[in-house]
Amino acid sequence: MTTTAKPSAKTKVLDAALAVIRTKGYAAATVDEICRVAGVSKGSFFHYFVDKEALAIAAAEYFSMGAAAMFDAAPYRKEPDARARVLRYVDLRAALLRGDFADFTCLLGTMVQETYATHPAIREACDQHIRLHADDVAQDLEAAKRTYAPDAPWTAGSMALFTQAVIQGAFILAKAHDDPAVAAECIAHLRRYLETQFPDPAHH
Amino acid sequence: MTTTAKPSAKTKVLDAALAVIRTKGYAAATVDEICRVAGVSKGSFFHYFVDKEALAIAAAEYFSMGAAAMFDAAPYRKEPDARARVLRYVDLRAALLRGDFADFTCLLGTMVQETYATHPAIREACDQHIRLHADDVAQDLEAAKRTYAPDAPWTAGSMALFTQAVIQGAFILAKAHDDPAVAAECIAHLRRYLETQFPDPAHH
DNA sequence: TGTACTATACCGACTAGGCGGTATGGTGCA
DNA sequence: TGCACCATACCGCCTAGTCGGTATAGTACA
């Protein structure tokens, strides 16, 4: 994709919003700072977004669409076996833990923590996009379940949400300890759980 | 304990801070609102806390100590078998998902998300207290591992952090979907994982 | 016992600055 | 000429934090 040819002011604001909000949260992210980081005037900002809350909702969608495009284009998608696809998805999530926290942590999880009670529209947007991604994961899980664990006592949807919970929680612990390695360990446990729930006949 | 006889202004502020920060996050929680909820003047607030950041750090400790006392007094602590103790801890975490989100979600996870980059002292306090609790869990896990899974490829410490990650992530998903049941499902998966990692000879 | 002094707990009006948001006007392109 | 886009100056409110002060209780000493 990389539509870096002519980044419009709107796109620059959205990119800046991702960076700033992921670093300091929604409430502490000021419109002025987002404009400064975007290299855009306040007039431009309010030309595209009626208020700060609207930016947050747009940023949630922007983040979600970007992530979806990225996962959709990832090589693991071509893996024919559903079980392997699930595990490779988890491996990809672990491999993404590089660079600053603002580069790999989840905007949705960060925002919803502090807005769920005060900004219902933001909460709703975060929920929607988290579930959009979880549904993608659930499709692979469903396929893998049919083949490898047809009688498992959980649904693919529930397992998909669990994967997202582990990832979100891993981000929190990593931020707290200031070390992405903590998140990697958590994802390793998630992988082990999935392996046990989808017993591989080849390794039996 | 229940020293509810004469709640000092300081204690009232700390209780109010827990409620307000868990509802709207650190940045959006204003000193004025915390004072209002506490029924205390602003003068009292700054008599006990040099600034808002100091309150956050004190609140982290207050929350942590309260939680530690609660878990320490919980009946599952008397369970002689370490494996059962671990599982009953998880069951307790699930049982606690009652009432408003501000009643059962974690202050530390909420605060660290939005302060890790901007308030190092708060980040440090959250990390310290998360790990304090994780260390308690790790002790039971270590004992269970010795008996039920001596050759498992993970450490008790790593597994303890994983349990906390699942719980933190479960809170995020529950807030996003506005339904604590989501968190309960996640914790059920965590329980299943622990069961597989500590194979029970009785059920074999 | 009474009195002077000190320390601690607490109060609420106030300030200075930062905040989200607005008003107005300029610029480039159809 | 009109419109989309962008810039700057500005506004009013809200914020964390300050400051001068009061109430209460304990202590020292005659």
Image (cartoon, coloured by chain):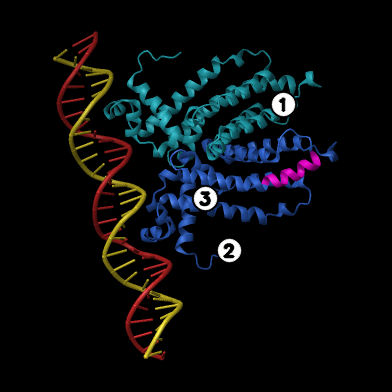
Chain colours: A cyan, B blue, C red, D yellow
Q: Count the numbered circles shown.
A: 3
Amino acid found under the numbered disc labelled 1: Glu
Q: Percent x, y for residue B35?
A: 40, 56
Is residue B87 located in the magenta-colored stretch of the structure?
Answer: no
Q: Tell me the number on the disc at residue B2.
A: 2
Q: Are marks 1 and 2 in contact (CB under 8 Å)?
A: no
Left-right relation of B166 to A11: right
Identify the residue under disc 1.
Answer: A195
Residue drawn at x 81%, y 42% as measured from the top left: B147
Is label 3 in a helix, a strand or a loop? helix
Q: Earlier in the sequence, mark 2 or mark 3?
A: 2
The chain under label 1 reads A
**Residues at marks 2 and 3 on the same chain:** yes
One can see residue B96 in this view: no
Q: Are marks 2 and 3 in contact (CB under 8 Å)?
A: no
Residue drawn at x 74%, y 47% as measured from the top left: B85
Identify the residue under disc 3.
Answer: B60
Alpha carbon separation for disc pair 1 and 3: 37 Å
